Image (cartoon, rainbow, N blue to C red):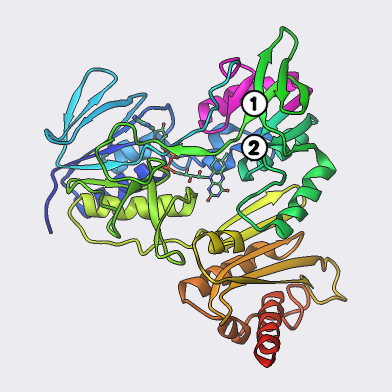
Amino acid sequence: MRVASRVLVIGGGAAGMSAASAARRTDPSATITVLEHGTFPSYGLCGIPYYLGGVIPRGEDLIAYPAEEFISRRRIDLQLGTAATGVDLSRRTVLTATGATLDFDSLVLAAGAVPIVPPISGVDDPRVVTVRRLEDAIALHSRLGNVRRAVVVGAGYVGLEMAEALCERGIEVTIVDRLPRVLTTVDETVAALAQEEAGRHCSLRLGTGLVGLHPEPEFVRVELEDGEVLADLVVLALGVRPSTSLVPELAALPNGALLVDHQMRTSHEAVWAAGDCVALHHLVLAGPAYVPLGPAANKAGRVAGIEAAGGHASFPGIVGTAVVKVFDLTVAHTGLTLAQAQSAGMAAQATEITAKSRAKYYPGAEPLRVRLVHTPDGLLLGGQLAGKDGAAQRIDVVAAALHARMTIDDLADLDLAYAPPFSPVYDPLTQAAQSAQFARAKQEAR
Ligand SMILES: Cc1cc2nc3c(=O)[nH]c(=O)nc-3n(C[C@H](O)[C@H](O)[C@H](O)COP(=O)(O)OP(=O)(O)OC[C@H]3O[C@@H](n4cnc5c(N)ncnc54)[C@H](O)[C@@H]3O)c2cc1C
């Protein structure tokens, strides 16, 4: 094992603290330093909407481990409130905002991502916020009692989760998006269900872009392409860009997401990276893709830490599995949508059915939309599920099927569990796969 005596990690979030902890387990004698700009290490960012909505009582409940756990038990030099401001790869040093210069043998970049903020006037008003940092969420939580009307700009999953959280607090919410639909991570027919559900709770202004934000003493005037909305709070949920400006010389996708190999090593031999600042190998696309999500940040962070400390590990890749609660609906997806497969130049088609989530006579059975994306000869490329019951656990079956490069025939043959409270005797996934088989047989018969 190569011994790396000084492992330096930039970013103390999910990826960075996973890397630092794994580095410690790999090399008990290494000096491991984490520079974290914020005041909290490793917290559940994904829980912020549920904290703001009142499901989680305290912001601190989202913290995975207190700083003391890392400092005393794992012997990690965790420097909170310390931003890295420069990286000199030739000298192998990192400069901090406090003026210190730290040497490293191995560097792990885990600075995450930053919310996209449009270059328009008014974004600096304190009533205009983004959702990324726990410190900001705690500050926002204390102000929500004074908010009557909110505008959420961006109808992706963070925007929809925030809209629900604000509705839970009794706030009137308007969701705005430049596109005429919500959730581009699923195809339109599935997104339509999420849109209908969101529309039951919020006003939707879709197909109209944000033009300007005009702060007035009593409210912010949100100027749209087709009118305006008044708000006490504006949440910008326009997606993120990877936080990689410290290392412009490393190979990256056009959006700045660092390119890494299966060991999470970047284009520099002494630099590894993980989390929302990297592009991961997408197993269905067979190439790098930027899909910034929590489980991969943790797992790839662990691999980066092991490798940076001189051990051996690898991260095979992702299929882009995600699930989101949209009020009473669950929307889950994995692999490619039909639109994504087609824009990647693949011959693809979709099979979509609606089945019951449980035996039809059993209380709680709900319609479950299942959409499978596959090649004309049946290779599975992706899956999408939407319903009030049974979507979340089934998407993991499709994810496993993608990892195993299954066909719709394989999926139809899977021995899935059945009991009336959980599934019809033909599971909705089995029904969808059989429907795809039937469609293919019809095509072949023509
Ligand atoms: C509201 C919300 C909900 C989400 N929900 C889900 C979900 O349900 N499921 C899911 O899979 N994913 C979800 N995600 C995404 C998930 O949270 C991220 O993929 C994950 O947190 C990425 O981890 P990370 O360590 O790369 O980044 P982060 O957790 O952002 O950590 C990066 C850290 O680096 C620090 N940093 C940045 N620059 C510097 C610097 N120059 N010097 C020192 N420190 C620096 C930052 O302060 C930050 O703490 C959600 C994200 C948000 C914002």
Give 74 or 159, whichever is nearer the viewer.
159
Q: x%, y% of residue 383?
A: 61, 67
Residue at 43%, 44% in the rendered image: 276
Q: Which amino acid, by three-letter code, is at mark 2?
A: Gly
Which image quarter holds the N terminus? Answer: bottom left
Query: Is residue 335 visible in this depiction of the protein?
Result: no
Q: Which residue ends up furthest to the front in the rendered image? A: 446
Quote the CA–CA distance across marks 2 and 1: 20 Å
Q: Is residue 29 magenta?
A: no
Three-letter amino acid code of the residue under disc 1:
His
Visible residue check, residue 336: yes
Residue 366 locus on image (x, y percent): 81, 65
Mark 2–mark 1 CB contact (< 8 Å) = no
Depth check, front residue: 202 or 62: 202
Q: Position of residue 144 (x, y in %)?
A: 70, 23
**Which of the pair 241/92 is nearer the observer?**
241
Q: Total number of numbered labels?
A: 2
Q: Earlier in the sequence, mark 2 or mark 1?
A: 1
Give the secondary structure at mark 2.
loop
Label 1 CB less than 8 angstroms from ligand 1: no
Q: Quadrant of the C terminus?
A: bottom right
Where disc 1 sits, the SS reads: helix
Residue tagged 2: 154
Which span is picked out in magenta?
122-150
Residue 362 place in picture, x, y as percent: 85, 73
Write the residue at 45% across / 64% down. 285
- Using a 10 Å C-alpha cutoff, classify the residue at mark 1 as few (fewer than 14 neighbours), some (14 to 19) or many (20 or more): some
